[in-house]
Amino acid sequence: MNYKRVIINKDIFRPRSEPARTIYDVWVKTAKHRELDKNWIQSERLSVLLAAQAYATKYNLPVPTIEDIERAEIYAVGSATFGADWARKVADIMEGKSK
């Protein structure tokens, strides 16, 4: 029998659309080092901010502020899909869909 090879995305929470995916990927990379960084909350916020600002600049979108990043983080806190929700909310802010 021939079976088609199925590639399964290992991270079911990873957003499929940009810029949320890029922001989420940077957050995941930073979050992996939480145990090494006593200031991990600030590190994660900064990495999300820098990723969002770089994407916004590259694609001529409104550049988010640290206040936007924190507001999006508060929106996502408590969710089982925290990282994805945070990234999507930041993307919504950048695309003018949310304030």
Image: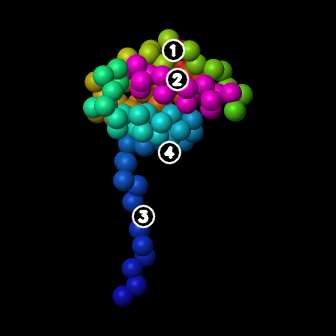
For disc 4, the marked residue is 16
Q: CA distance from mark 2 to mark 1?
A: 6 Å
In the image, taking residue 97 as reference, residue 11 lies left or right, namely left
Q: Are marks 2 and 1 in contact (CB under 8 Å)?
A: yes
Tell me which amino acid carries mark 1.
Answer: Ile
Query: Where the N terminus falls, by quadrant?
Result: bottom left
In the image, taking residue 9 as reference, residue 53 lies left or right, namely right
Q: CA distance from mark 1 to mark 4?
A: 24 Å
Placement of 8 over or under 42, stated as above or below: below
For disc 2, the marked residue is 49
Number of on-image labels:
4
Give the image quarter of residue 97.
top right
- Residue 7 is tagged as 3
Which callout, 1 or 4, points to the residue nearer the camera?
Answer: 1
> In the rendered structure, which disc, 4 or 2, sits on the residue that comes first in sequence?
4
Which callout, 1 or 3, points to the residue nearer the camera?
Answer: 1
For disc 1, the marked residue is 66
User: From where the camera sits, is residue 49 visible?
Assistant: yes
Q: Are marks 4 and 3 in contact (CB under 8 Å)?
A: no
> In the rendered structure, which disc, 4 or 3, sits on the residue that comes first in sequence?
3
Where residue 89 sits in the image (x, y, percent)?
48, 25
**Label 4: how many Cα within 10 Å (few below 14, some 14–19, many 20+):** few
Is 43 colored magenta in this rendering? yes
Q: CA distance from mark 1 to mark 3?
A: 37 Å
Is 72 colored magenta in this rendering? no
Which segment is the magenta one? Answer: 41-57
Q: Main secondary structure of the magenta part?
A: helix
